[in-house]
Image (cartoon, rainbow, N blue to C red):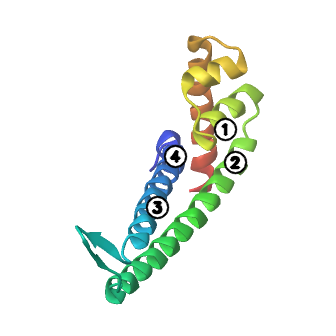
Amino acid sequence: MITAKEYLNKIRELDGEINDKIDDLDDLRAMSTTLGGFQTGERVQSSPNYDKIEKTIIKIIEKENEINDLIDQYVDKKTEASKMIDRIENQNERRVLRRRYLRGMKWRDICMDMSYKWAQMHRYHASALINFNMILNEID
């Protein structure tokens, strides 16, 4: 049985994985622009290596498809979690969970945003996780 915190952290992990893959894609795109002609000392070679360019373009397309699949999973999980959070009665508990897990905010920023001290924020968080767990167990 997965806990509320594990379930909600999976959303944050997916977000991080998407960002990592976008960085990889950016690297591939940067590499693809350097595969054309290049200079070696005084000699200039202008005929591009089409085989390398083609392989890089294929890798770019595959990476884009991979990112799109992850984004679909992320949106589905986030939507499902948001619906479960909506079922929590206490507004402050809902706000804490949304800010922490759906928006990825840091604790310090959540405290400032909601105008609560650290201890109070963590009491809301602990209570919210208990309530989210009950909702999660209803689904299973």
Q: Which residue is at 32% across, 83% downward?
A: 52
Q: Are marks 1 and 3 in contact (CB under 8 Å)?
A: no
Kind of element beneath mark 2? helix
Kind of element beneath mark 3? helix
Q: Are marks 1 and 2 in contact (CB under 8 Å)?
A: yes
Kind of element beneath mark 1? helix
Q: Earlier in the sequence, mark 3 or mark 2?
A: 3
Q: Which residue is at 58% across, 58% downward?
A: 74
Q: What is the x, y in percent for residue 40?
A: 24, 70
* Residue ID for mark 4: 12
Q: Which residue is at 40% across, 61% downward?
A: 27
Q: What is the x, y in percent for residue 137?
A: 57, 48
Kind of residue at disc 3? Asp
Task: Decide if residue 62 is on the left or right side of residue 91.
Answer: left
* Residue ID for mark 1: 98
Kind of residue at disc 2? Ser
- Gap in angstroms between the C-alphas marked 1 and 3: 29 Å
Q: Say which mark, if any, is on residue 82.
A: 2
Instruction: State the image quarter where residue 127 is shown.
Output: top right
Kind of residue at disc 4? Arg
